[in-house]
Amino acid sequence: MNEFDLIVIGSGPGGYIGAIRAAQLGLKTAVVEKEKTFGGTCLNIGCIPSKALLDSSEYYSMAAHKDFEKHGLEFSGLKLNLKAMMKRKEKVVEELTNGIAYLFKKNKITSLRGFGKLLSENEVSVLTEKGEEQKISAKNIVLATGSVPNELPFMPFDGKFVISSTEALSLEKVPEKMVVVGAGAIGLELGSVWMRLGSDVTVLEYQNKIAGVMDGGMSKRLLQSLKKQGMKFVLQAKVKGADAQSRKVFYELNGEEQELEADVVLVATGRKPYSEGLGLEKLGIQKNDRGFVVVDEHWRTSIPHIYAIGDLIPGPMLAHKAEEEGVAVAEIIAGKPGHVNYKTVPSVIYTWPELASVGKTEEELKAEGIPYNIGQFPFSANGRAKALGFTEGQAKILAHKETDQILGVHILGPRASDILAEAVVGMEFFASSEDIARSFHAHPTLPEVIREAALAVENRARQM
Ligand code: NAI
């Protein structure tokens, strides 16, 4: 007899949201978490603390660059109190992780602290730090153990000179020189934080573009913008190694050996699924050649009542993608038709300006031979952006040439992450660009750029 209907291993966005949905649907649910706090990477050492630091550092940078003087606000004696900034970040994290503990209680979810390991098809062992073991059983198990930073074999993390995003969120002083390896979301966001706080930041990127999978045109604009702010970039750089003693990073560019001085090197070259010690091998649960757990279209592993979601399985490694999978699996277990629409997974890089995207890029549409129209609109012509003093960037809508269905939306600009939500909902409802163009948008607001971009698909945009 199983004690639970469902055991979820891991309490990140995939695990905790899935567990809550399961409990809401009447399933007797337990969550196993190895860390002291709930919330996984996203809440503890990822999305949330990085956003707290991005917001704090943005205010600092605005003050340091005298942006407030344009508003008639003059002050002197600006001082950075990094300790206080970090404390605030920790408070933001603490409040949110405590919030999960509250939600578990409210939804009558049993939470167990300890390392979860599959013992059999229905049994999980929970091993506490003190070495005490508890065995629990369930009809269904969801693996939601997430991912960890990728280590470069030739320059392993030492936590001091060669660091991962985890340490980059808690540096005790602003490094004079920081080298970032990898111009993806982590490199650009955390590079921005330390650049704004005064670091001389150089990003070494293997490809000839930044922001990997993002729309090419938008990625170019973001590169220009970050360069203007003082971030340095070396594209097509092949990083070879680092030496903590001489404080140097070595790389190859156009066949020539180069080196850079650094106080700290942030390696942000991707993350890998975390399934160490989970007991997959013993049960014959399949992984692919990159270590991701193989699942079918209902997130079932090779053992049908053991599911896997989030960063542990192939697909974008994003909190909101994991959340949706967690919900879908809970619904499937409860006998409902759980579903995730992977065509509308939004993607955001929280730099300044932010880069937010959903659907196809121009490169993808061209490669797939899909005919499309483009509508674009700059923030410099948006009334609210002008009032705020943030006029950099633009919105771009890609709509099917014949049907006008929106295929992709890309926004580079202030709070692009928030503005994108409308595009995601629109695409979920198969909106045409005309649908957006004919919908009310309060005036003056930043989301009006989307409406104007939609109007621009038919050359009907207006200046504001
Ligand atoms: P990423 O995969 O987004 O970017 C890594 C970058 O490093 C790529 O541009 C790649 O070409 C480059 N790279 C790889 N090896 C290299 C080498 N040896 N030398 C130089 N460049 C190299 O990975 P990132 O930024 O570490 O993020 C990990 C995951 O976390 C991603 O899936 C990302 O989407 C997710 N994430 C999402 C955030 C968001 O949604 N805002 C924030 C932070 C992370």
Image (tube, rainbow, N blue to C red):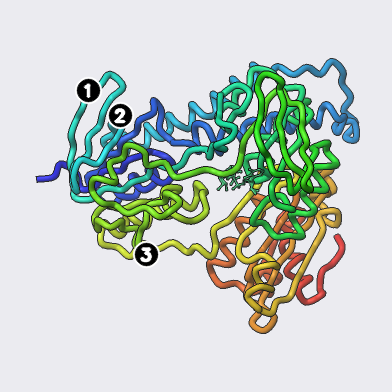
Question: Residue 60, can we see it?
Answer: no
Look at label 3 and name its amino acid.
Answer: Glu
Image disc number at residue 297: 3
The quadrant of the picture occupied by the N terminus is top left
Question: Badge 1, how many Cα within 10 Å: few under 14, some, many 20+?
Answer: few
Residue located beneath label 1 in the image: 132
Which residue shows up at 41% across the image and 41% down it? 274
Which residue shows up at 69% across the image and 35% down it? 180
Look at label 2 and name its amino acid.
Answer: Gly
Helix, strand or loop status at disc 1: loop
Question: Badge 2, how many Cα within 10 Å: few under 14, some, many 20+?
Answer: many
**What's the distance in space between the residues labelled 3 and 2, CA to CA?**
30 Å
Question: Badge 3, how many Cα within 10 Å: few under 14, some, many 20+?
Answer: few
Image: 86 above or below 296: above
Q: Is residue 103 left or right of residue 240?
A: left
Quick one: label 2 or label 1, which is nearer the N terminus? 2
Look at label 1 and name its amino acid.
Answer: Glu
Image: 129 above or below 393: above
Q: Nearer the viewer, residue 459 or 124?
A: 124
Are the residues tagged 3 and 1 within 8 Å (C-beta)?
no
Which residue shows up at 38% across the image and 38% down it? 11
**What's the distance in space between the residues labelled 3 and 1, CA to CA?**
37 Å
Which residue shows up at 73% across the image and 26% down it? 262
Residue located beneath label 2 in the image: 114
Helix, strand or loop status at disc 3: loop
Residue at the bottom extreme? 402
Q: Position of residue 307 (x, y in %)?
A: 31, 53
Give the quarter of the image for residue 304.
bottom left
Q: Is residue 289 left or right of residue 229?
A: left
